[in-house]
Each structure stands twice: as C-alpha cells, then as structure tokens.
Image: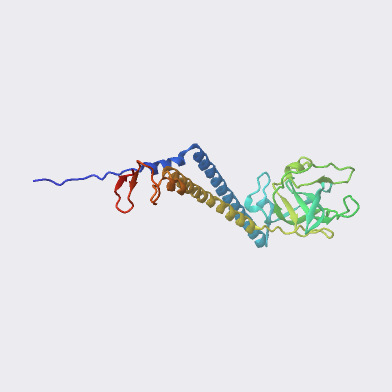
C-alpha cells in the first residue's frame, strides 16, 4: 500500500524584483528615509506643542471669564512659595500699606492700543513681605518725560487685583534720578525688581481692577486659542505628507529600476533589427526568405 505523498511548494524568487527592492537600501535612500523620519517626528512634536498651548490658552480664557470672586492673598500666593499655574488670572484680595518710596514706572507700555506707562507700587503686607501692584496705566504726552500720575493712597488699603506671573526679563532697571523719583523698568520681572527692594516679594504681581481716578485698568487678557489649534492641525498635516511623499518617491524609484532591468530600448532601434520583408534587389549569394511560405533560397 502506497502512503500519501506530500509535496512541498517551492517559492521561486524573482531576481529582477529583488534587485528592484535592493535599490531602496542604498546610502542615498537610507539618508532620505532618516531625514524624512526626523522631519516627521519634528512636525508631530510641534503639533503636540501647539495643541498644548491651545488647551492652555482656552483654559486661561475660561478662568478669566469665570472670575467673579476674590480669594485671600495668603491662600493663593503664600509667602515663600512658587506660583501655582492654576492660580494665574484669578482675583486676589490683599491688605497692606503702599511703599511709595519704592514705586516703579514701566516704560513703553500699551493699553487698549494707547502708548504710555504703568505705575507699580509695592504693597507691604502684615508679615513684612510685599506684593507688587500694578495700580494702572496712564497715557504718554508730548513732553518726552513721564507725565504726572495719581499718587498711591496712604495708610492701610485693601486691593483686589488679577494675578499675573512674572514677566520675562528685558531691559534694565534705572535708579531714581532725584529724591522722590520712581524706579524705571521695561518689564515687570520680579527677580530684576526684587534686587532693588528691601523686602521679600510674593511670587506673582497683581493688576488693580479698580484703579484710582486718572489711571486706567489694564485690559482684560484674552488669548486666541484658535490660532494654536490651527497651527497644530497644520503641523499634523505636514507630518502626514512625509510618508506619503516617501512612498511616491519609492514607487518612482522602483519603476525606473524595473525599466532599467528589463532592458527597454527605443522603437527606432527595434525597427532597425527587424529583417526586410519588402521585395527588392538581392545580392548574389544571399539568402532570400519567402514572405508567404517561409522557405529560403539562395540567390544566383
């Protein structure tokens, strides 16, 4: 009895096709693939960063819009502690005494599309620390100097203001030119200004939402989160285009390699190699092939 006969399929590799794929593992293609991967990863990271910025700005807009009650300064900005990111833009109530001898004027400021200055006065709290209070904005005039502005109230005051984080450092702090003159600065940077003051500052500053007459409240922050969402989508599209472009180039490379491997030649060269089929004079001793029967005869 003859048992079952098993056969094993033999997969034949196409040498031509293998050669085509090998064209994609050259140094040039490896470098192109690596560069494409770097570009794609960079675009993805930028898209994620822009999306995070959009979410952060949208959350800030919600906090600003929902701020309808104030919290004690010691609850939001405890002495010696860093600013909690969730505390930005909230309303804080602080009581203390203004130190007008250490007043600061911020140069080249803009508020509601008007150029001018902002006046910042340290509010010394009960524990001896202080918080910088931006008391408001006043417009520039044609004198070229700092216009007069309302003085800070004397005695103990209670201020309700919006919490702002320290601004990036920029420019220098100018010492008073004469007794009674304020410090001058470009940015409200707590580290820069703190070096000119005699007390510890809280980790953020306040913008008075009800400034004195003659001063304007700082315009309410509003962040355009939709721009960041748009940028995030654009970077994601750029990332998607990288593999699409790579595939298109690879297909083109394989096609060109296949044409080269097949030995394709122009039609004119093929026509030149074909035997003549039309009647005509034939040299003596040459072989003539009949176009009808296919038989050959030697011409005499």
Q: Residue at x 30, y 46 (%)?
A: 296
Quick one: 165 or 80, which is closer to the camera?
165
- Residue located farthest toward the front when viewing the structure as drawn: 300
* Total marks placed: 0
Image quadrant holding the C terminus, namely: top left
Quarter residue 208 falls in: bottom right
Against 63, residue 204 (above or below) is above
Q: Residue at x 49, y 39 (%)?
A: 30
- Residue located farthest toward the top when viewing the structure as drawn: 27
Side of 259 where 97 appears, left or right? right
Which percent across, then down, holds residue 122?
78, 48
Against 125, residue 23 (above or below) is above
Coloration mode: rainbow
Quick one: 202 or 30, which is closer to the camera?
30
- Residue located farthest toward the right when viewing the structure as drawn: 143
Side of 292 where 115 appears, left or right? right
Which percent across, then down, holds residue 169?
73, 43
- Residue located farthest toward the left when viewing the structure as drawn: 1
Which percent across, then down, holds residue 120?
79, 50
Which percent across, then down, holds residue 181?
87, 46
Side of 122 where 274 appears, left or right? left
Quick one: 163 or 37, which is closer to the camera?
37
Q: Residue at x 70, y 52 (%)?
A: 164
Quarter residue 142 falls in: bottom right
């Amino acid at each position: 009895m003859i048992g079952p006969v098993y056969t094993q399929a033999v997969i034949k590799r196409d040498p031509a096709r293998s050669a085509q794929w090998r064209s994609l593992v050259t140094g040039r293609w490896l470098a192109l693939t690596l560069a494409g991967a770097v570009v794609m990863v960079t675009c993805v990271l930028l898209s994620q960063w822009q999306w995070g910025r959009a979410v952060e700005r949208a959350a800030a807009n919600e906090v600003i819009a929902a701020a309808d009650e104030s919290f004690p300064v010691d609850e939001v900005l405890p002495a010696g502690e860093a600013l909690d990111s969730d505390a930005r833009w909230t309303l804080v109530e602080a009581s203390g005494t203004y130190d007008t001898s250490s007043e600061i004027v911020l140069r080249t400021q803009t508020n509601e599309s008007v150029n001018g200055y902002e006046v910042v006065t340290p509010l010394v709290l009960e524990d001896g620390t202080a918080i910088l209070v931006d008391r408001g904005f006043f417009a520039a005039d044609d004198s070229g100097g700092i216009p007069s502005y309302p003085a800070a109230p004397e005695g103990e005051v209670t201020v309700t203001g919006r919490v702002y984080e320290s601004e990036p450092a920029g420019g220098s702090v100018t010492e008073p030119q004469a007794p009674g003159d304020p410090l001058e600065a470009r940015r409200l940077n707590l580290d820069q200004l703190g070096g000119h003051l005699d007390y510890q500052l809280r980790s953020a500053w306040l913008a008075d939402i009800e400034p004195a007459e003659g001063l304007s409240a700082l315009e309410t922050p509003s962040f355009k989160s939709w721009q960041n969402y748009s940028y995030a989508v654009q970077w994601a599209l750029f990332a998607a285009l990288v593999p699409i472009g790579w595939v298109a180039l690879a297909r083109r490379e394989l096609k060109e390699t296949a044409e080269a491997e097949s030995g394709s030649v122009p039609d004119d060269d093929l026509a030149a190699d074909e035997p003549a089929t039309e009647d005509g004079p034939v040299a003596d001793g040459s072989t003539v092939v009949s176009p009808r029967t296919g038989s050959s005869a030697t011409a005499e």
